[in-house]
Image (tube, grey):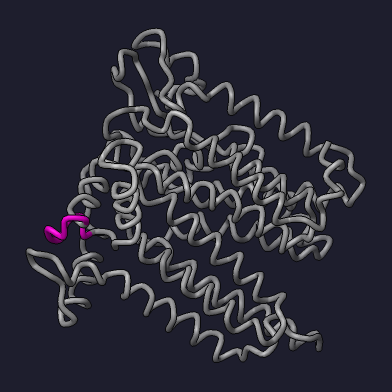
Amino acid sequence: MLDRLKALQTRPYLVALLLGLAAQTLFTVHLDRPSRIMFDEVHYVPAAQALLALEGPRNIEHPLVGKELIGAGIVLFGDNPFGWRAFATLAGTATVLGAFAFVWLLLGSMRAALVGAVLTALNQSVYVQARTGMLDVFLGAFLLWAMVVMLWAAKGAPAQVRRRWIGAAVLFGLAVGTKWAAIPYVALAGLAFLVIRLRDARAGRPPHWPGLGLVSGLLILGVVSIVTYFLTFLPAFFYERDPLTLAGLIPLQRDMYALQTQVLAKHTYQSDWWSWPLMIRPIWYFYEWDQEAQRGVLLIGNPMIMWGGLLAVLACLWAGLREKAIRPLGVALLWIASLGIYVVIPKSIGFYYYYHLSGIFLCLVLAAAFHHFDRGRGKGREEWFLFAVLVAFVYFYPILAASALPDPQGFQKWMWLPTWP
C-alpha cells in the first residue's frame, strides 16, 4: 500500500498537508472530555489565566512559553476545556509533521517519512499529551522542529544556511522557554554540529552547513537561543504584582533552579528513568465520574511502539557499528541520549511523562530501522507493523480519550501489568 504513494515522492508538501489535517482531526475530536481540569493542568491552566490577567508571578518553576500558548487558546476559544487544550492539539500536529519532515530530510524516503509520522500520531503518549494543557507537548514540538531546521540548513545553499541555522537556534530558545529539560538538547545540537564538521574535514569532503564557520555556528546557536529564551519573559515585566525587572531576571533563574531541584515528597505516580522504556508505571491523568459517565485518561505509550522500538534501537546500533550506517546509528544515539539526560539531571523524583521526547524518538528509530533493513525491496514489513500499532491504539482508545466506561471498575480490562492501575 505504501508503494502506491511513489507518485507523491516529489510532493512532500501535499503529503504533509494531508497528514496535518488527519492528525489535527484525531487530536481535536472530543477535546472537551473530560470537562474538568485533569492532572497537572491544575498547575498550568491557572498559571495561564494569571498570565493573561498579568496578575503576577505564578508557577515560576517553569518558564513562560507553554503557559503563554495555553493562554492563547483561552483567548481564542474561551476559558473552557477546549480553550485550555486547543494549542496542545496544534503542538501535537506539529510533532507529527516534525517527524515526517525529520525522516524525509534524513533519509529522503517518502515511505520512511510516512512511517515515522503515522507512528508518532498513533503513539499514545503523544495523543494524550496533545489533548492536555501541559508543557511537554510544546517542548517536544519545538525541539523536534529545531532538529528539522538544523537538517534543512545542512542541505541548503551557502546563502540559505545562516538564516536556517538562526531559525533552528530560535526554536531551541523557545523549547528552553517551555521547559529547562530542553537545555541538554541545545548542547547535544552543538556537539553534533562539531562532530559532523570535524568528520567532514577529516574525510576531505564538502562540509555540511556550507558557508557557516565552526566557531560562528556554535556562537549563533548559543547566543540566539539564549536571547530568544530571555525575550519570552517579556510579559512578566508588565505584572501588576511583583513585575519582573532586568535586575531581577538572573535571580529569577536561580529561584527557578532551586524549585526544579528541590526534594519533593513521594508521589503515587513517581517512577525511575530505567522503568520508562518498559512502561512499568503509566499515569492516570483522570479517572472520575464526568458528563454522566465514568471516564478515564491514562498516559500510556503504544506497546507496539514502546516495546518494539527497543528492538529497533538495538537494530540501528547494530547497523551503525557493523555496517557503518550513520543515519540509523544517529537516531538510536538520539534516543539513548534523551533517556540518559534523566540519569544525570538533578531531579529528586521522575514521572513517565518525562519519557515523552524519547517516545517520539522511538518512532524515528523505527522508521530508520525499517528503511535500512528493507533496503528498498518494499517487502511491506512496515505495513504489518503499522496495522498492529493501529490495532493497539484502537484497543486503548477508550482510556486515552475519556470515553464512557460501563462502571467504576471498567478500566480493569486494559490493565496488563499489576503496576498499571
Left or right, 352 with respect to 260, comes to right
Q: Residue at x 46, y 73 (%)?
A: 170
- Residue 116 falls inside the magenta stretch: no
Q: Based on the displayed image, in which of its 4 quarters is residue 150 positioned? A: bottom right
- Residue 326: x and y in percent read 75, 65
Q: Based on the displayed image, in which of its 4 quarters is residue 41 positioned? A: top left
Q: Residue at x 28, y 59 (%)?
A: 62
- The image shows residue 213, relative to residue 168, as above or below, that is below
Left or right, 61 with respect to 229, comes to left
Q: Based on the displayed image, in which of its 4 quarters is residue 405 positioned? A: top left
- The image shows residue 238, relative to residue 357, as above or below, that is below
- The image shows residue 395, relative to residue 342, as above or below, that is above
Image quadrant in which the C terminus is located? top left
Q: Nearer the viewer, residue 262 or 212?
A: 212
Q: Residue furthest front?
A: 76
Q: Nearer the viewer, residue 421 or 377?
A: 377
Q: Residue furthest top?
A: 406
Left or right, 331 with respect to 110, comes to left
Majority SS type along the magenta span: loop
- Residue 225: x and y in percent read 43, 76
Q: Residue at x 73, y 56 (%)?
A: 12
Q: Residue furthest right?
A: 377
Q: Residue at x 77, y 62 (%)?
A: 321
- Give the magenta range: 52-60
- Residue 226: x and y in percent read 38, 78
